[in-house]
Image (tube, rainbow, N blue to C red):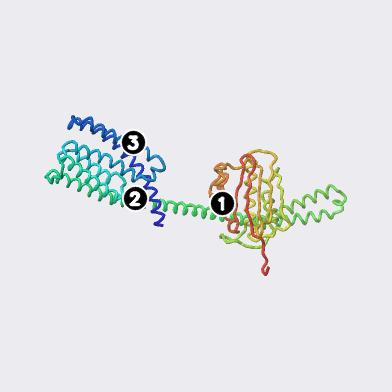
Amino acid sequence: MMRALSAGYAAALSEFRLEFSRAGAYTCIVLVLLGIAIDSALYPQLLGCFALARISVVALTFGIILLMRGAWGKGRIQWLTFAWLLLPQIMIAVMIALSQGVASIYYVGMTLAMYSSGIVLAFGLWQNLVFGAVSYLLYLAACAFHAGRVELSAPFVVNSLFLLMSATVSAVFTFYNERARFMLFQLKAEVAAKNIELESTNKNLADIKGQMLQQEKMAAIGTLAAGLLHEVNNPVNFCMMAIDVAMEQPAARASPMLVECLSDAKEGMLRVQHIVSDLKTFAYRKSGARLERSHFLFERALAASVRLVGYELKDVAVRCDLPEDTLVSGDEAAITGVLINLLGNAVLSMRKAKRLPFEILVAAAWDGERLRVTVRDNGPGISPENLSRVFEPFFTTREVGQGLGLGLSISYSVVERHGGTLLAESVVGEWTSMHFDLPRAIWEGR
């Protein structure tokens, strides 16, 4: 953790140093040029010489700024910063040597450079100490050159003390500035980590909320299905018995049309029985996320889902391409629910695009011990920006009031609990495919 934090801090500090070094270099150029006014006021006889020195420093500093823009310069930003900071110190030392030596006011410029290196620029402690030492040695050399030797006069001692004090204060500032920058970066890293953790918590809460809503919906549908089974089956059974009795009557046998009508009525009653039975199997389940594992035929779950969404599938051609063996292991009701969601979404998207003919292909094939299932429609497809979000809880492209955006999210969780993955593929304007896989049924002792 600390190693990753240190690496991140080093990268951030590199960008910080680059930004402030550039800004400091431009400021240095401005200050060096403004110093011409001081030269003209204090040493007009040396103005030409000093102006040449200042222009040379400005040119070299600008060249260093250009080097900072390349990859080579960015990798050596501390050394380049040290270089352009040292240029004005060398210039000031030359001016001190050529003007009044110890009595020259230009030593103040050296102290300003020292303070800026420790307070403003992101120097390291050792770099600041070296910069302070080099700056003082330049001052010492300038005074010795002017006088021919080093004189321990009162002005020299006072100026030296000021320079050494500036170097010391700058080094202390550098040390604590570095600590403050690291602590600030550490705090930002902790806040970023907390934000990521909070986003994960919010996502988990959204998933839990979606599952709770789905469980409440399933409980309500289950209660309704149980009531329907009781209330509908009795009259359906009476109708079936009545139809059977009517078909045995001589008058019915004598009329082929009447026999055909009675047969159609009986077939309709059988369909009602199947729909109620499928609805009960799908919805009347035990609460909780635990799977009711059993062995079942995938084709049976598919047939049940097609019957349950039969009204929506009017004018839709559903083609199936299944292997002979579709015996899988899992929760049949849950997989039926997944298929209902996938078929319902496919129908809605196709009808929204109004591209005839409406076709859905449900294909499956064995891949080792997994049954790979594909549900493909010829609808308008899903845009790339939405394709990566279709399994997010509460994400929907439908109008308000037409869905909660939980169907695919819950279906994803169901498939995941079966050890598989629900994936989406699409080409805008052509088709959308949903893929998931189920485990093969393995009998005990096999």
Q: Position of residue 356 (x, y in %)?
A: 69, 39
Kindly identify which numbered label has been placed on residue 200: none
Kindly identify which numbered label has been placed on residue 409: 1
Q: Position of residue 308 (x, y in %)?
A: 67, 51
Which residue is tagged 2? 184
Task: Using the numbered discs, state the Cα–Cα distance from disc 1 to disc 3 in whole angstroms.
Answer: 58 Å
Residue visible at 20% across and 30% down? Answer: 40
Q: Position of residue 413 (x, y in %)?
A: 57, 55
Task: Using the numbered discs, state the Cα–Cα distance from disc 2 to disc 1 in whole angstroms.
Answer: 39 Å
Q: Earlier in the sequence, mark 2 or mark 1?
A: 2
Task: Tell me the amino acid under the disc marked 2.
Answer: Leu
Q: Looking at the picture, does residue 403 appear above or below residue 105?
A: below
* Residue 277 is at least partly visible in this image: no
Q: Earlier in the sequence, mark 1 or mark 3?
A: 3
Position of 315 compared to 32: left or right? right
Position of 427 compared to 317: left or right? left
Kindly identify which numbered label has been placed on residue 62: 3
Q: Secondary structure at mark 1?
A: helix
Q: Are marks 2 and 1 in contact (CB under 8 Å)?
A: no
Residue most extreme to the bottom: 445
* Residue 114 is at least partly visible in this image: yes
Q: Nearer the viewer, mark 2 or mark 1?
A: 2
Q: Are marks 1 and 3 in contact (CB under 8 Å)?
A: no
Q: Earlier in the sequence, mark 2 or mark 3?
A: 3
Work out which quarter of the rendered image holds the N terminus and state it: bottom left
Task: Using the numbered discs, state the Cα–Cα distance from disc 2 to disc 3 in whole angstroms.
Answer: 32 Å
Q: Nearer the viewer, mark 1 or mark 3?
A: 3
Q: Secondary structure at mark 3?
A: helix
